[in-house]
Image (cartoon, helix red, strand yellow):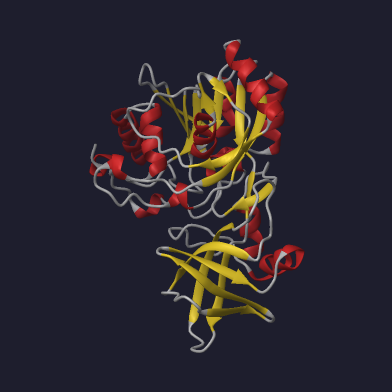
């Protein structure tokens, strides 16, 4: 299976630079994966496609201001890093460790010190190739405060927003985000408003939350022409016991499990074995591409993804490549907005 099979051309003006206002006014392309039928709706109408007992699974991870800009000690040259995840000796709740795995630019050599703010410095202590490990001179609550004071929201490079940092921290976040740890947003959830969630609950739709802290695995490009040769970077995820029990019971009763985004989808599929969802926490590195047989997920709410990207391959696996690429061409023709702040798709 060749990566070039998952390419398409997108006019630059269709790359969304800010979310729709209100969020649920975004367009919604509904795909019936069995009949191949397309319907063009608004996201606020998504309840028309759900029924009482359907379960919507959200990724409640929250985006960190993970982009730090500083000056190299010795040369005073500009250095920019993206925090990926803290290096911790035990798993569990998010820890503001002094050591973090990062990517950075320009080239950051072993031993390089970087000044980010007054009395806030980091040093590259390990070279992992593309990734590095940095050690900060602060940790715990002190580190959290200084990162939130001087860090920037890590919006993707195709977004050239004129929004202020204060506004971006609110816009580049789902309304249900709870647990800090992501360096990119689970963007399929951007379309939900608190009012829409409330109305769906009144209809009898059930919401459950899992956590996957979005990192390099989700947004790293595929650099192999043979799709099967790509290796996903790991991302920490957790499914609590009550959620796992509820979802297993719902699945056994024939209730539909609908995931919001590729991160929630990968989490449920990774935690499923022998037809049962298992509670726990682990590093998720499952790579889903066409030919994959889904074990737990019945429906998917997602965005329109970059060409040749792992999320596009997952969506193609959930439906089929030909239908998804046809849907993308239909969306381009209808002037849908693409990527993180763009419009939505429901595959059911």
Quadrant housing residue 122: bottom right
The residue lying toward the viewer, choosing from 131 and 28, is: 131
Q: Could you say where residue 148 lies in the image, as x and y percent from the top left?
A: 69, 65
The residue lying toward the viewer, choosing from 247 and 196, is: 247
Tell me, yes or no, if residue 295 can be seen here.
yes
The residue lying toward the viewer, choosing from 34 and 343, is: 34
In this rendering, the answer to whether 278 lies above or below 177 is above
Tell me, yes or no, if residue 205 can be seen here.
no
Q: For the view shown, which residue lies furthest in the bottom direction?
A: 74
Q: Could you say where residue 337 lies in the image, as x and y percent from the top left?
A: 44, 45
Q: Residue at x 37, y 46 (%)?
A: 231
Q: Could you say where residue 343 lies in the image, as x and y percent from the top left?
A: 48, 41
In this rendering, the answer to whether 255 lies above or below 88 is above
In this rendering, the answer to whether 339 lies above or below 267 is below
Determine whether, in the image, residue 159 is placed left or right of residue 198. Answer: left
Q: How many marks?
A: 0
Determine whether, in the image, residue 262 is placed left or right of residue 115. Answer: left
Q: Quadrant of the N terminus?
A: top left
Determine whether, in the image, residue 28 is placed left or right of residue 192. Answer: left
Q: Residue at x 54, y 85 (%)?
A: 73
Q: For the view shown, which residue lies furthest in the front direction?
A: 89
Q: For the view shown, which residue lies furthest in the top direction?
A: 253
Q: Residue at x 37, y 28 (%)?
A: 292
The residue lying toward the viewer, choosing from 93 and 189, is: 93
Q: Could you say where residue 264 lies in the image, as x and y percent from the top left?
A: 55, 35
């Amino acid at each position: 299976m060749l990566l070039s099979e998952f390419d398409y051309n997108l006019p630059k003006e269709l790359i969304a630079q800010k979310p729709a206002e209100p969020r649920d006014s975004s367009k919604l392309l509904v795909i019936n994966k069995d009949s191949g039928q397309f319907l063009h709706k608004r996201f606020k109408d998504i309840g028309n496609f759900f029924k009482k007992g359907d379960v919507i699974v959200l990724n409640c991870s929250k985006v960190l201001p993970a982009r730090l800009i500083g000056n190299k000690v010795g040369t005073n040259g500009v250095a920019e890093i993206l925090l990926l995840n803290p290096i911790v000796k035990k798993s569990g709740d998010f820890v503001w460790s002094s050591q973090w795995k990062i990517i950075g630019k320009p080239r950051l050599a072993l031993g390089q010190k970087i000044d980010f703010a007054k009395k806030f410095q980091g040093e590259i202590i390990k070279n992992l190739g593309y990734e590095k490990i940095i050690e900060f001179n602060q940790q715990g609550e002190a580190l959290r405060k200084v990162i939130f004071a001087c860090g920037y929201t890590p919006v993707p490079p195709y977004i050239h927003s004129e929004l202020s940092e204060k506004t971006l921290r609110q816009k580049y976040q789902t309304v249900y985000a709870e647990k800090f740890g992501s360096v990119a947003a689970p963007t399929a959830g951007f379309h939900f408003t608190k009012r829409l969630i409330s109305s769906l609950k009144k209809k009898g739709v059930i919401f459950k939350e899992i956590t996957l802290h979005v990192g390099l695995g989700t947004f790293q490009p595929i650099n192999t022409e043979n799709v099967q040769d790509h290796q996903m970077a790991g991302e920490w995820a957790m499914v609590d016991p009550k959620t796992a029990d509820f979802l297993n019971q719902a699945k056994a009763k024939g209730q539909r499990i609908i995931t919001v985004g590729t991160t929630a989808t990968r989490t449920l599929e990774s935690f499923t074995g022998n037809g049962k969802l298992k509670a726990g926490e682990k590093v998720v590195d499952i790579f889903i591409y066409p030919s994959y047989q889904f074990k737990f997920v019945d429906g998917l709410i997602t965005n329109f993804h970059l060409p040749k990207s792992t999320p596009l391959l997952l969506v193609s696996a959930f439906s089929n490549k030909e239908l998804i690429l046809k849907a993308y061409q239909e969306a381009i023709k209808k002037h849908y907005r693409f990527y993180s702040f763009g419009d939505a798709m429901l595959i059911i």
